[in-house]
Amino acid sequence: MRLIRSAPFARVVLAALVAFALPATGPAHAEASRAHALPVPGLTAPMLSPDFWIERLDAPEAQILDRAAIDAMNTAMRRDRSIHAPLALPATLSRTTVIDRITAVSVRPTAPRFTADGPLAASALDALVNALALDDVADTVEPAFGLVVRRADLRAFPTALRVFSRADDTDIDRFQEDALFPGAPVAVLHGSRDGAWLFVVSERYAAWIERRHVALGARADVAGYVERAADGLVVTGATAHTVHTPEAPAVSDVQLEMGARVPRVAWPGDVPLNGQIAAYGHVVELPVRAADGALSFAPASIPRAADVHEDLLPHTRATLIRQAFKFLGERYGWGHAYNARDCSGFVSEIYRSVGVLLPRNTSAQATSTALNRIEVPSDMPYAQRLQLLREADVGDMVFVPGHVMMVIGHVDGEPWVIHDTAGTYLRGDDGAIRRVPLNGVVVTPTTPLLADADGAPMIDRITSLQRVR
């Protein structure tokens, strides 16, 4: 029997069915919607996968530069003023040379500085300058040599004190310069007043490092390790860690960064290493620091499951995209703080995994003549700048003052980049400009990015493009 209902009743039932079928609009739904919201115009979920960008390319696996071409580029890069050769320093350095190196980085701030507890007092700055112990620098200095044994910060002053330009911005530590990774060779030029810090010259930076992270040895021993590592296992993940081993704490849970190379050790697969059969890992050699600071070497195991390769990755557009996306979502770390990296460290480690050496800071990266540089004059019109970006290829680095972005592709004429950024400004649908604290490795288009709260396009701030080709 067919039941006939009145129209009002039917409308009630229909409304109930629609309400059931449509998404909820209450607080729980609002939270879910926010969880799936994407932060920049045009960004879609598929764009957060490297495959999206690789599949758009013609011949993504085609080699850009071969090993010989990269070696030649690196040779040219080592003539850059920002690149040092710590193991090639002369046997003695003058007092003036050493002091000049220290004071180039250990510059007493003239603007107000803050700590987590409030303003940094002038007396505290006096103490930090005194800690440099410049009066202890001898007339003639004989450099010592060593290898870094654990990831360690490089600091402007011999202190772990975090210092900020503003009391409300505690992410940017103005004393944080860089980080050094296990196996990095250094020349030691000086020690702090309390002896807990060393002023070192590394390949890409000179600054202060905690003594406990450096093992000191003969120059030849340090150089020998570097030579062995040149043909060693390559870390191709964002990081790789040695296995935890209570039998050998010095090589337990050692973090290695993308592009790092470590010497391999010929170890029988059926013979235990530090209480574990070796066949299920990669046996490598790491520097070890004795209680007195002396350098030695020890075998360690990296799990087979780790993202490592027997050799450098091929320099292709697909490789660069895959490597970049291994950092996606990582927290931004000024000067490699937060066990992470900043914009210039980000591109450096991507390129290091294919064997390319880049300077440490954006200022040097943007101007290096070892790369294929396109200068962007300050008076270049917006349309011409946009056209440069539309012609840019995957891997090209785009520089604005203090920041670098890497091109990953184009969608409907819009150039897209991946970069490690503290944040950006965007214009909302209502026309209002707001700061978006991206604070990490992100994928964004270029044209919506604004340089400041006044609405200046980021594109108008571009100073150069650098091409590794």
Image: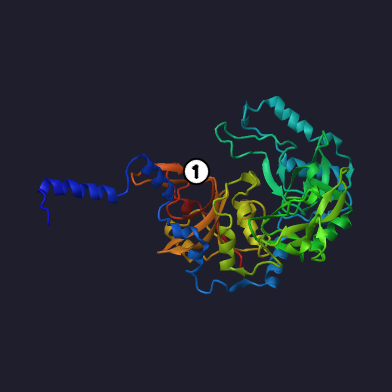
Whether residue 214 appears in this view of the structure is yes
Quarter occupied by residue 425 = top left
Which residue: 38% across, 41% down? Answer: 28
Residue 320 placement, left or right of 448: right
In front of the other: 347 or 327: 327
Identify the amino acid type marked 1. Pro
Which residue: 85% across, 39% down? Answer: 137
Find residue 230 and report its horizontal and vertical position in percent: 77, 64
Q: Give the residue furthest to the front.
A: 1
Which residue: 12% across, 45% down? Answer: 8
In front of the other: 149 or 244: 244
Whether residue 367 appears in this view of the structure is no
Q: How dense is the environment of label 1, judged by Cα within 10 Å: few (below 14), some, or many (20 and up)?
A: few
Q: Is residue 225 above or below residue 156?
A: below
The number of discs equals 1
- Residue that label 1 marks: 437
Question: Please, which colouring scheme is shown?
Answer: rainbow
Find residue 307 and report its horizontal and vertical position in percent: 65, 61
Find residue 42 and report its horizontal and vertical position in percent: 40, 56
Considering the image in quadrants, where does the N terminus appear?
bottom left
Considering the image in quadrants, where does the C terminus appear?
bottom right
Find residue 80 and report its horizontal and vertical position in percent: 70, 58
Q: Secondary structure at mark 1?
A: loop
In front of the other: 339 or 370: 339
Which residue: 75% across, 40% down? Answer: 103
Residue 382 placement, left or right of 148: left
Quarter occupied by residue 266 = bottom right
